[in-house]
Amino acid sequence: MKLPRNSKIFRGQLDAAPFASVFFLLAIFLTLSSELVFTPGVRINLPEVPQPLPGTVNPRVVVAVDVAGQFYYESLLVKDEEDLRRRLKAVVRASPEPLTLEILADRSAQLEPIYRLMALAGEIRFKEILCVARSQPLPKRAERRSSE
């Protein structure tokens, strides 16, 4: 079968409608994947500190404590403290490296559940225990204006 050789390359004006539709689709996808979409969860207001705090290089396990003193592990509410103990023990046993426990405690939370969690982490033999805080942004220096 022989193909025709009289076909020419299109040299006319491009239609803007396909480009506009692709642009609007991209805009919709970016909007839906951004922060505008509601993410379910429990609000934890971390305490603020004036300077950045050092972190850790070890693998970490995160447990959150809300205002009511409830524990959240792997983004799920843990109602029983014994269940939390069992889960954390399993994670420590399964890890070949020493782990760090990061506690995300709400600034208005009672200290008693946080202390219980720290004691539990000491029993389970975590290498480090860190209470996470949000560092405040540094204030901008006022620019000096020359009086020339």
Image (cartoon, rainbow, N blue to C red):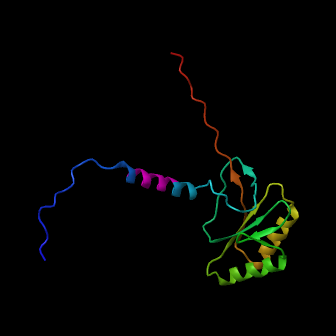
Say above or below: 25 vs 144: below
Apparent side of residue 25 relative to residue 136 in the rendered image (left or right): left
- Residue 40 image offset from top left, x and y in percent: 71, 62
Q: Quadrant of residue 97?
A: bottom right
Q: Is residue 132 left or right of residue 81?
A: left
Q: Is residue 26 left or right of residue 60?
A: left
Q: Residue at x 57, y 57 (%)?
A: 32
Nearer to us in this view, 79 or 100: 79
Name the spot of residue 19 as percent of width and height, x first.
38, 52
How many callouts does the rendering have?
0
Residue 1 point in image, percent of width and height: 13, 77
The image shows residue 20 at horizontal and vertical percentages of: 42, 50
Give the main secondary structure of the magenta stretch: helix
Query: Residue at left 55%, top 54%?
Result: 31
Residue range highlighted in magenta: 19-27
The residue at 84%/76% (across/down) is 80
Check if residue 134 falls in the magenta segment: no
Give yes or no for residue 26 being in the magenta stretch: yes
Give whichever of 70, 93 is nearer the camera. 70
Give the image quarter of residue 111: bottom right
Judging depth in this view, the residue of 12 and 126 nearest the camera is 12
- Which of the 4 image quarters holds residue 8? bottom left
